């Protein structure tokens, strides 16, 4: 364990060997990294632990720079463990270079099947026992981290003293198709809110779409810039500043000429670059909704066909607005994105996987005894409010704070207020 300091804060590095498959504890091992953060001074030594499970899947945990409101608030009452969930950050990485070394696409897909919430929770339990023995700890789950928290409550509640969730109560029995059937209207609503706020963007977005439909345009990485790629920028709209950022992006795409400017193309590339940094997100995103029998079969793509308003032809060939899409992964992304293309075959095999282990135990959640407090964002574009509220009603004793004041990134953007509210709820 290595430690370091900055004024008022102490950090310590922890690395743990865990089984790739927890059902085969003597089989292949991977490493999982976690950063301990505590306030300076002796008083912090006696504080309870708070495990933070961040959003994703597939993103490294927070790298504290100072001034993170929720973390500063948490350190008043806890010593915090920032977990790089398996496959992310300083944990054993998964990307277009490491995955092919595992073997064939079928072997890669089998490997990737162990990177969902169920495996993450079993990692957390192993880590808890190594760090603090039988003592339970608290958990704070943001977005996908909230999904993991509900899995934790389902299968290892004895490890938890209390649980906090922000924007991350999943549908307990909803398959991927039901999730997207609920989310597409929410994404459409975000589009209409954006255009009402910035009506000039309607014409600007249509002009870009029409240009892309008749011209071969590439982004700086060589990725084809199609209308569908342009639509995927709508993922921005679910963040507190996303609408403003999209508006500024669309201010002057053509620079007074007939071609898209390099400045615009570089900005678009920057907005899409996270797929290269976190390919695991694209690979297992839909699998995070899968339980029991039935393949996800590229659910977001199939369900989108039920919502013709997202068809780019509405804007390119008609007089309707272009609707941007949201947190959806489509098969064409593994054809056009250079960082994902080497993983295409494994992605298709995951989408065709016929069955998956359960992620939640409804009966056990109905008997829950762990204190659970959750923030549900009324206008959340990424997690369906209706499904979240159904889950909150199922988890015995769960308390909810339903708010329209914050977007999905409330913990990041207003973390001290959000976490303090959850901690102070009776």
Image (cartoon, rainbow, N blue to C red):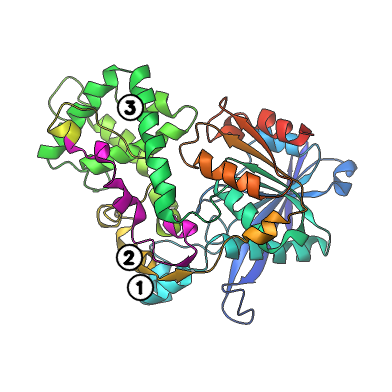
Magenta stretch: give its range. Answer: 285-313
Quadrant holding the N terminus: bottom right
Q: Picture quarter containing residue 164?
A: top right
Dot 3 corresponds to which residue? 249
Of helix, strand and loop, which one carries label 2? helix
Label 1: how many residues lie within 10 Å, few (<14), some (14-19) or many (20+)? Answer: many
User: Are there few (<14), some (14-19), or many (20+) residues within 10 Å of tag 3?
Assistant: some
**Residue found at x 57% / y 74%:** 21
Asked if residue 187 lies left or right of residue 206, the reply is right
Q: Give the SS element for disc 3.
A: helix
* Image coords of residue 302 (percent x, y): 30, 53
Q: CA distance from mark 1 to mark 3?
A: 37 Å
Question: At x 47% / y 27%, what residue is drawn?
Answer: 241
Q: Return the mark for residue 105.
A: 1
Q: Name the spot of residue 97 as percent of width and height, x first.
A: 39, 65
Residue at x 55%, y 51% (from the top left corner): 60
């Amino acid at each position: 364990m290595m430690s370091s300091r900055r004024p008022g804060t102490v950090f310590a590095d922890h690395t743990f060997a865990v089984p790739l498959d927890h059902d085969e504890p003597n089989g292949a091992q991977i490493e999982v990294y976690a950063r301990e953060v505590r306030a300076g001074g002796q008083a912090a030594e006696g504080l309870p632990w708070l495990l933070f499970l961040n959003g994703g899947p597939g993103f490294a945990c927070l790298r504290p720079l100072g001034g993170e409101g929720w973390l500063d608030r948490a350190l008043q009452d806890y010593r915090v463990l920032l977990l790089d969930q398996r496959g992310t950050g300083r944990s054993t990485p998964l990307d277009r270079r490491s995955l092919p070394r595992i073997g064939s696409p079928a072997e890669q897909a089998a490997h990737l099947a162990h990177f969902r919430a169920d495996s993450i929770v079993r990692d957390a339990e192993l880590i808890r026992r190594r760090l603090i023995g039988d003592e339970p700890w608290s958990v704070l789950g943001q977005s996908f981290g909230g999904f993991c928290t509900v899995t934790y409550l389902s299968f290892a509640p004895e490890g938890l003293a209390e649980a906090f969730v922000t924007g991350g109560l999943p549908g307990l029995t909803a398959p991927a198709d039901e999730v997207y059937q609920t989310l597409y209207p929410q994404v459409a609503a975000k589009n209409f809110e954006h255009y009402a706020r910035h009506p000039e963007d309607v014409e600007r977005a249509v002009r870009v779409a029409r240009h892309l439909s008749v011209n071969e345009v590439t982004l700086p990485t060589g990725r084809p810039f199609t209308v569908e790629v342009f639509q995927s920028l709508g993922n921005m709209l679910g963040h507190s500043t996303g609408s403003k950022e999209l508006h500024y992006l669309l201010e002057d795409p053509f620079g007074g000429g007939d071609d898209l400017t390099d400045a615009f193309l570089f900005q678009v590339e920057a907005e899409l670059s996270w797929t290269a940094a976190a390919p695991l997100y694209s690979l297992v995103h839909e699998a995070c909704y899968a339980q029991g029998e039935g393949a996800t079969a590229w659910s977001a793509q199939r369900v989108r066909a039920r919502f013709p308003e997202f068809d780019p032809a509405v804007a390119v060939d008609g007089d309707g607005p272009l609707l941007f899409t949201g947190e959806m992964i489509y098969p064409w992304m593994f054809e056009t994105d250079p960082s994902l293309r080497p993983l295409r075959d494994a992605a298709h095999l995951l989408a065709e996987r016929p069955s998956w282990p359960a992620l939640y135990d409804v009966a056990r959640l109905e008997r829950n005894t762990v204190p659970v407090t959750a923030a549900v964002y009324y206008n959340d574009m990424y997690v369906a409010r209706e499904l979240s509220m159904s889950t909150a009603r199922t988890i015995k004793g769960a308390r909810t704070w339903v708010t329209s004041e914050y977007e999905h990134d409330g913990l990041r953007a207003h973390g001290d207020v959000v976490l303090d509210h959850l901690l102070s709820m009776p």
